[in-house]
Amino acid sequence: MTILVTGGAGFIGSNFTPYFLNNNKNVKVVNLDKLTYAGKRSNFQDVNNNERYTFIKGDICDRAILEQLFNLYDFRSVIHFAAESHVDNSIENPDTFIKTNVLGTFNIVDVAKNHWMIGPHQIKKGYENSRFHHISTDEVFGTLGINGFFTEKTAYAPNSPYSASKASSDFIVRSYFHTYGMNVVTSNCSNNYGPKQHDEKLIPTIIKKALLGEQIPIYGDGKNIRDWLYVLDHCKGIDLVFHQGKSGEVYNIGGNNERDNLYIAHAICKILDELLPKDRLYKDQIAFVKDRPGHDFRYAIDATKIESELGWKADENFESGIRKTILWYIEKYRTKI
């Protein structure tokens, strides 16, 4: 069986693909990625020599390429990671996010539907188990106050062009289940961190700036709270939802590790003081900068559904996961330190 992974050169996709290949020996993976600034060939060098892996450079907004690939490889399932994902960039260039996240998702789910189905609620013979797994984010739910958690029943209330575009893509995928009877599942995750994440994101930025002796920028007062999920734990959750999730259902995947941004910065600095001590404390590099527009206060996921129904649990807490992450980035930046 051959499946299509979109965005497999990005952060989460490039962590997922080697995990998936290692745990599914009878599956071949074709990775379709546009290789934007956030997707790097180096991210998937650990699977380049795997005979069950193929990389193709292409854009999910190019419907002709998608149709050609489905005809050539006869994909039996899709795991859809490809998306623009940086909130700051969505504020500056929202049109890119609408195009990729909305139009791109429509293209891929519609081409898959046409390949697997004769018509509404009519599946082609041999494609009964073909599944479309859409990867989304907890940001579609908006923001929380001090109390409460996002569940699969939480109403959508996106507050940035990025989260609005992801909410739109979620609704498109949902509609293909209800209208056409297509076998789809969606998973919404909390903030991921770990190896291969782009430098623009919070944790890699803190680590890199600390190592280079530069100012560590923290938005506002640093009190914005996120639920942090180690990327490999997320990959395990995706694998479970893809194989065992109920068609048409949504599963929230969260790390149950709420930390505010200032805590994150101090925790990283403290570990660096231990691993690579220098003549001053790393925390002295922390500086507060102007908050970004519409900055959501708090995200927190209730992962009870995936834990109780599919038996998933996070193996890493924040303290264990952040240490592994820091060690990976020290190696990445070693020549620059």
Image (cartoon, rainbow, N blue to C red):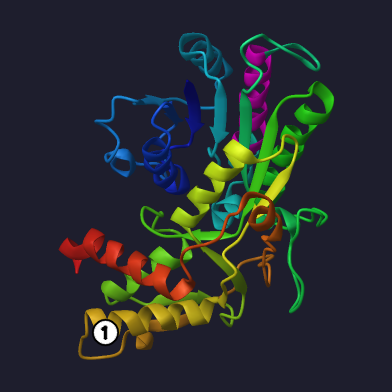
Assess whether residue 176 is covered by the magenta stretch. no
> Is residue 195 at least partly visible in the picture?
yes
- The residue where tag 1 is placed is 274
Q: Amino acid at mark 1?
A: Glu
- In depth, the one of 231 and 199 nearer the eye is 231
Q: Is residue 6 left or right of residue 216?
A: right
Q: Is residue 237 left or right of residue 275?
A: right
Q: Is residue 59 above or below residue 330?
A: above
Q: Position of residue 315 (x, y in %)?
A: 47, 63
| Magenta: main secondary structure | helix
Residue beneath the point at 35% across and 72% down = 323
Q: Position of residue 173 (x, y in %)?
A: 72, 33
- In depth, the one of 149 and 95 nearer the eye is 149
- In depth, the one of 105 and 306 nearer the eye is 306
Q: Is residue 305 above or below residue 46?
A: below
Residue beneath the point at 60% across and 69% down = 256
What range of the chain is rendered magenta?
A: 100-116
Residue beneath the point at 38% across and 77% down = 268
Q: Is residue 13 left or right of residue 161?
A: left
Snapshot quadrant of residue 50: top left
Q: Position of residue 301 (x, y in %)?
A: 67, 63
Q: Is residue 67 left or right of residue 270?
A: right
